[in-house]
Image: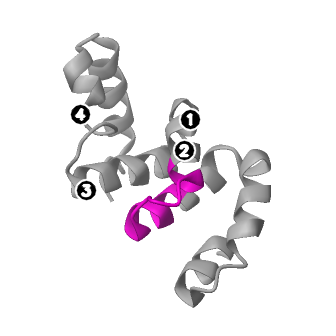
Amino acid sequence: MRASEDWHQTAIATAYAGGDQEWMLTAVESVDPEIHFEADEAADHWELGAAWPHIAALVNDARTPKHLLIAAVGAAGSIRPKEAAPILVELADSDDEEEAKGWVN
């Protein structure tokens, strides 16, 4: 997983605090699905509360691609488990067995 070392979090926070709007939007606004996926994974790994609105929007959007949805569900459970619980319970009833299993893990 990207940014899995402790020093990575500091480096990312420092770069983000630099104020370069294009840099800050690169991951979460990227149209590149791999970059977007990695951003969601990092939000999950580091339990980034600031990512909640973006993660919640992905989870609640029926058009979210499956791989991003699965990453967002993991992040939602890590970032705000109490707020995510009702959404995840609803998703656990999915007809897609892979999706339903992913929501409850």
Q: Distance between the residues labelled 1 and 3?
A: 18 Å
What residue appears at the point 56 percent right and 55 percent down from the top-left corner?
Answer: 59
- The secondary structure type at the circle numbered 2 is helix
- Amino acid at pointer 4: Thr
Asked which secondary structure carries label 3, the reply is helix
- Asked whether residue 50 is drawn in magenta, I would say no
> Is the residue under label 4 in contact with that under label 3 (CB below 8 Å)?
no
Q: Earlier in the sequence, mark 2 or mark 4?
A: 4
Circle number at residue 34: none
Q: How far apart are marks 2 and 4 (CA)?
A: 18 Å
Residue under numbered circle 4: 26
Q: Nearer the viewer, mark 2 or mark 4?
A: 2
Asked if 43 appears above or below 94 in the picture, the reply is above
In the picture, residue 104 is in which quadrant? bottom right
At 28% from the left and 10% from the top, the residue drawn is: 19
Q: Name the residue under label 1.
A: 53
Q: Which residue is drawn at 65% across and 55% down?
A: 77
Q: Residue most toward the bottom?
A: 97
The answer to the question of whether label 2 and label 1 lie on touching residues, with beta carbons closer than 8 A, is yes
Q: Which residue is tagged 2?
A: 57
Q: Is mark 4 on a helix, strand or loop?
A: loop
- Residue drawn at 22 percent across, 14 percent down: 20
Residue at the limit of the structure toward the front, as seen here: 63
Identify the magenta region.
Answer: 58-72
Q: How far apart are the two marked residues, 2 and 1, measured between alpha carbons?
A: 6 Å
Q: Position of residue 72 (x, y in %)?
A: 50, 56
Where residue 17 appears, x then y in whole percent?
Answer: 34, 14
Q: Which of the marked residues, 2 or 3, is nearer the chain's N terminus? A: 3
Indicate the quadrant where residue 9 lies. top left
Q: Is residue 45 left or right of residue 27?
A: right
Q: Are marks 2 and 3 in contact (CB under 8 Å)?
A: no
Q: Residue 33: give its label.
A: 3
